[in-house]
Structure formats: structure tokens, C-alpha cells
Image (cartoon, grey):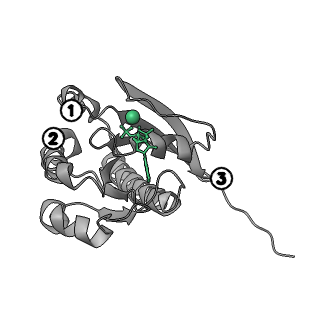
Amino acid sequence: MGILNSKPSKLRHARVLLLGLDSSGKSTVLYKLKHIKDFTTFPTVGFNVEMIELERNVSLTVWDVGGQERMRRLWGHYCENTDVLVYVVDCVDHQHLEESRREFELILKNEHIRHVPVVLLANKQDLPGALTAEDITRKFHMKKHCGDRNWYVQPCCATSGKGLAQGFCKVTEFVKSRKSREAITWDFFKQN
Ligand code: G3D
Ligand code: MG
């Protein structure tokens, strides 16, 4: 029989900022991830925050900040110490798509999240007329605006939960690579 001598790997904590226009599905995403079954979402006044652990040793504190116009002016205040930005898009709300794209571009310019990885959730894929993840990638100019960071676009349906596991797997993957890079840099400074 072999002997396994593995050190318990370090717990990584990460702060995830969940943004998007109001009604895009942010709170539904959050409660679905938390496996809270009987939830009814109300327009989020202020923010909701939940701790979730989808993978052993990686715990995510997810901040779901209200997306109404007056709340969007405050998004910038939640950016500090963010490890991953998750941006939710309502793929059937064609009327507000341009507004969503504008807000997305604006938040990407925030100095605290300049190189922070982005996962874009192309939500409401269950509804007829939903734009695909490819359409959203193109319309949000992901290659141009996120060329300097890790990014990923995940189609999903927050009400059924379809696609959320994959989207948040990507979040954890980005967290791990970011945290290992930080650890290497930290070790380098300690040694020099
Ligand atoms: P927000 O937190 O971004 O403001 P919510 O958005 O999570 O409150 O969701 C707004 C509405 O969209 C809710 O419906 C919610 O059930 C619905 N919704 C969220 N995700 C999906 C999805 O993937 N598919 C469909 N069909 N609906 C979704 P109500 O009716 O409660 O306003
Ligand atoms: Mg909400």
C-alpha cells in the first residue's frame, strides 16, 4: 500500500463582485448557488452578501450589489480587494443591452479591478430570443476590453441553475491562478 504524505492545501478566500443591471438575475444566481430552494427575489436595495464554498479549500464571498441606476453610481466603492468580477447580462432584454455594455465598460476602468479576471454570465438562456454567449462576447467587445486579463463568457439560466457550476468553476480557477501568482510574488519579496 502506498503512503500518501500530502500537506493540507491552504484555504483560499476570495472576494467576488457580482454586478449587472437590475433584473439581470444577480440575486437569483446568488441564491441558486447557495442552494436556497424557496427564494423569491426582490429588487436588491443596497447589497446581499453570501459565503459559498463550491470547491474544497476555495471559499468565495460573493457581493451582489443592486443594479438600479442610483446604485450603479456606488459600484465603484465595492471594487477594492475584488479577486474576480462576475457580470450578469439579461440576454433577452435587447432594449437595455447597450446600457449594460456601457456600465460594464465603465466598471472595467475602475483602478481597483484593472487586472481582475472577469466571468460574464449570459443569463436567461431558457427564454426565446436570448442572445448566445458568442453574440454577447461580440457585442461586449470582450477581446478588446478584456485583452489584459483573464475572461470567460458562460451561457446560463439562473432559475434552473444550468451553467452556473461551469461559470463558477471558472471563477475558482481564476482565483487559484491569481492567488498562486500573489504567493509567488510574496515569496520573492520575502527572499529578496
Ligand atoms: P437582479 O438581482 O439582478 O435584480 P433578480 O435580478 O435575481 O431579482 O431577477 C429578476 C427577475 O428575473 C426575477 O423574476 C427572476 O426570477 C428572473 N430571472 C433570473 N434569472 C432568470 C433566468 O435565467 N431565466 C428566467 N426566465 N428568469 C430569470 P421576477 O418575476 O421575480 O421579477
Ligand atoms: Mg437583486
Q: Residue at x 87, y 76 (%)?
A: 1
Tell which of 182 and 148 is nearer to you. Answer: 148
Q: Earlier in the sequence, mark 3 or mark 1?
A: 3
Q: Residues within 10 Å of mark 3 (few under 14, many from 20)?
A: few
Q: Could you say whether the residue bearing mark 1 is in a helix, strand or loop?
A: helix
- Which residue bears the numbered disc 3? 8
Q: CA distance from mark 3 to mark 1?
A: 41 Å
Query: Does ligand 1 reach within 8 Å of label 2's beta carbon?
Result: no
- The reply to whether dot 3 and dot 1 touch (C-beta < 8 Å) is no
Q: Is residue 60 left or right of residue 174?
A: right
Amino acid bearing label 2: Asn
**Of marks 2 and 1, the one in the foreground:** 1
Tell me which image quadrant ligand 2 sits in: top left
Q: Residue furthest front?
A: 128
Q: Is residue 11 visible?
A: no
Q: Could you say whether the residue bearing mark 2 is in a helix, strand or loop?
A: loop
Amino acid bearing label 1: Arg
Q: Is residue 24 above or below residue 79?
A: below
**Horizontal and vertical percent for residue 188?**
33, 53
Q: Earlier in the sequence, mark 3 or mark 2?
A: 3
Q: Residue at x 12, y 65 (%)?
A: 144
- The reply to whether dot 2 and dot 1 touch (C-beta < 8 Å) is no
- Which residue bears the numbered disc 1? 72
- Which residue bears the numbered disc 2? 110
